[in-house]
Image (cartoon, rainbow, N blue to C red):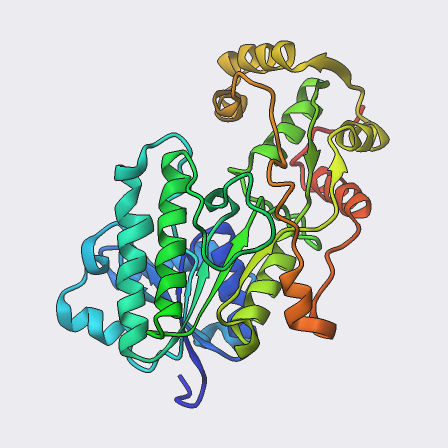
Amino acid sequence: MPPDRPVTLLTGATGFLGSALAVRLAEQGDTVRCLVRGATAEERAARLRAALDGRLAEEHRHRVEAVPGDLAEERLGLPPAAFEALGQGVSRVVHCGARVNMTLPYQPLYGANVRATEDLLELAEARAASFCYVSSLAAVGRGVTGEPFELTAPVSGGYGLTKWSADRLVSVAHQEGRLRAVVLRPGRITAHSGTARSNPDDLLEGVIRVSARLGLAPVLDTRIRLSPVDWVSRLVVALCGTDRAHGQAYHLIAARTLPWAAVPAALRAAGYRLTDLPYPRWRSAVLDAGRKDPALARIAHALPETPLSFDDRTACEPRNAARTLGDEHPEPPSAERLLEATLSRWQLAGELPRVT
């Protein structure tokens, strides 16, 4: 690999957002050192190739490499010499990896989400590398307004608490002058605006697919934000690449919301016949269908008993990114057009049932 290229150490490259970051960083000319679990170099390379899924052009593939490391293990599961070598030549750490589980308590998530952040901060400090931490809105208390760099109001839930703890570690390291850091807090990340490639674990998109499949739509008192992964990844790379962003936090969510009612309306416009049901009845119908259809079981078991809320961070208005990036700030696509285009592409790809 060319020695004059900037070297970025990236975690989470096999995930939905992380793989998009690996592609974008490589396309802009970075050498991207991707931390990947695996017993052998072949296994790690295969996992990374599968995550990138042919999205990286041949001319850029030489810029991406899989290096060993496990966020769940102390010091990334590496012996001292290998841990130190991991940072060799690195000018920037983009920490996007995490164990995402909304049901586990704090302790089982601590290693991957908190201790690994401490280890990566140590590595970045030793190499005088900047640190870009992809946190989460789950770390932000519901009463918090604006986009504070340091979070002082704790949150509940094991996952949220680990992200809150790691978020604070990063902000304190910057304030103490140990390194230069930026904190990025995405909310729900939705399908790619161009290809409609989506996260199979996303609850909102799962609910949309189930509704189309069963011909049943829940009546919900909630709003949604469509923050496509290509737009979020573009913001992450832009903010990580400018010194003006250091010492600030950014909530990476679309400013505009849509009422949930816009979703069944878009499905009907796409040709689906839907019956509206109160959420408890709709959930029961999905649970019944999931007992007979394994394809529906995963989403059925993810549904809470209380009505779904897809946008519960209404006080987290995203303003800092536009202020920092100015004319370079990308605006997300129109929410209505994005929803319509996504449904159309899912239909063409067979990810939604054929309209009869």
Q: Residue, x 42% and y 54% (percent of image)?
A: 14
Q: Which of the 4 quarters of the picture holds residue 96?
A: bottom left
Q: Which of the 4 quarters of the picture holds residue 262?
A: top right
**Residue furthest to the bottom:** 4
| Left or right of 94, for residue 173 | left
Q: Which of the 4 quarters of the picture holds residue 178?
A: bottom left
As drawn, 107 above or below 83:
above
| Count of picture labels | 0
Residue 185: x, y in percent?
52, 53
**9 and 157: which one is in front?**
157
As drawn, 280 above or below 311:
above
The answer to whether any part of residue 235 appears in the image is yes
| Left or right of 58, for residue 179 | left
Q: Residue, x 65% and y 54% (percent of image)?
A: 318
Residue 346: x, y in percent?
69, 40
**314 and 107: which one is in front?**
314
| Left or right of 30, for residue 81 | left
Instruction: Locate the N terminus by quadrant.
Output: bottom left
Residue 101: x, y in percent?
40, 37
The answer to whether any part of residue 47 appears in the image is no
**45 and 331: which one is in front?**
331
Instruction: Locate the C terminus by quadrant.
Output: top right
Q: Residue, x 60% and y 40% (percent of image)?
A: 313
Residue 155: x, y in percent?
43, 39
